[in-house]
């Protein structure tokens, strides 16, 4: 009797051995490469998780380890061999033989362009912001040295100002401090959606969501009411995951 047959026969008799064999099969490692270096990672691992585990930096803003992934900030884009477009690292799972580039010139330029457009809509009041020094968006601006305004966004803003259709201006919602534990300043919102997912994931009351479309899109409450007129339980989870000073 061969060794394999012996193991299989024992597995039939021993349920624990059957489970261990199934676990071993499920844990078969996946071979990938990141920026030319080869690694082995577990199946179902995202590109972002694999990169972080092996010491590679990928910028993120909408991603938070405690929240379901969304992939809407588009800052974690990476180049993958065989893909006709960059892929979001936070939502893409690794596959056998995957070749990933996290710092190609195209990726860096895309990230800088996205940050530049976001900065164009963000108020320049870091010195008076409560999150100054503890702001993820500020850290990204410094890391990628975003100084100049985005040329296309600046042109559109100038054009629509002349026609009184300012679709690219930040939303100047009133500062909402109607509750005792949460204060909102939506002028600082970067539309990452973390607060929306936190409200749903932790409390399942869904009082925050995206309202309007395109340049008018922003985070708001039902009927745009103050927080004290909603079902908010003042848990503060939205403020804990906000990457900027929009919710404190």
Image (cartoon, grey):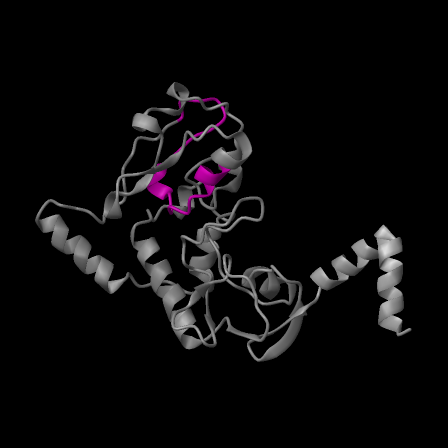
Highlighted magenta segment, given as a residue range: 177-198
Residue at 28% from the left image edge and 62% from the top image edge: 150
Determine whether 168 is above or below 94 in the image. above
Determine whether 32 is above or below 218 in the image. below
* Residue 52 belongs to magenta span: no
Left or right of 122? Residue 163 is left
Of 211 and 130, which appears nearest the observer? 211
Q: Main secondary structure of the magenta part?
A: loop
Left or right of 46? Residue 132 is left
Residue 13: x and y in percent read 89, 54
Number of marks drawn: 0
Of 66 and 236, which appears nearest the observer? 66
Residue at 43% from the left image edge and 72% from the top image edge: 83
Residue 28: x and y in percent read 70, 66
Of 241 and 138, which appears nearest the observer? 241
Residue at 41% from the left image edge and 39% from the top image edge: 246
- Hey, which quadrant is residue 111 in on the image? bottom left
């Amino acid at each position: 009797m061969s060794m394999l047959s012996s193991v299989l026969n024992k597995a039939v008799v021993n349920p624990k051995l059957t489970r261990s064999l199934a676990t071993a099969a499920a844990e078969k490692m996946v071979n990938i490469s990141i920026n030319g270096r080869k690694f082995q990672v577990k199946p179902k691992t995202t590109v972002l998780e694999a990169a972080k585990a092996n010491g590679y930096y990928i910028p993120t803003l909408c991603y938070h380890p405690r929240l379901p992934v969304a992939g809407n900030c588009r800052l974690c884009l990476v180049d993958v061999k065989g893909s006709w477009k960059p892929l979001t690292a936070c939502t893409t799972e690794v596959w056998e033989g995957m070749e990933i580039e996290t710092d190609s010139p195209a990726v860096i330029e895309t990230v800088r362009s996205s940050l530049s457009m976001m900065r164009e809509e963000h108020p320049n009041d870091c010195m008076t912001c409560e999150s100054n020094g503890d702001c993820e968006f500020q850290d990204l601006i410094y890391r990628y040295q975003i100084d100049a305004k985005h040329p296309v966004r600046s042109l559109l803003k100038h054009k629509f100002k002349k026609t009184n259709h300012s679709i690219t201006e930040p939303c100047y919602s009133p500062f909402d401090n109607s509750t005792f534990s949460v204060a909102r300043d939506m002028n600082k919102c970067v539309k990452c959606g973390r607060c929306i997912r936190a409200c749903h994931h932790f409390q399942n009351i869904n009082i925050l969501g995206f309202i309007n479309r395109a340049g008018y899109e922003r985070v708001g409450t039902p009927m745009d009411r103050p927080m004290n007129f909603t079902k908010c339980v003042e848990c503060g989870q939205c403020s804990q995951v906000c990457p900027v000073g929009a919710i404190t």
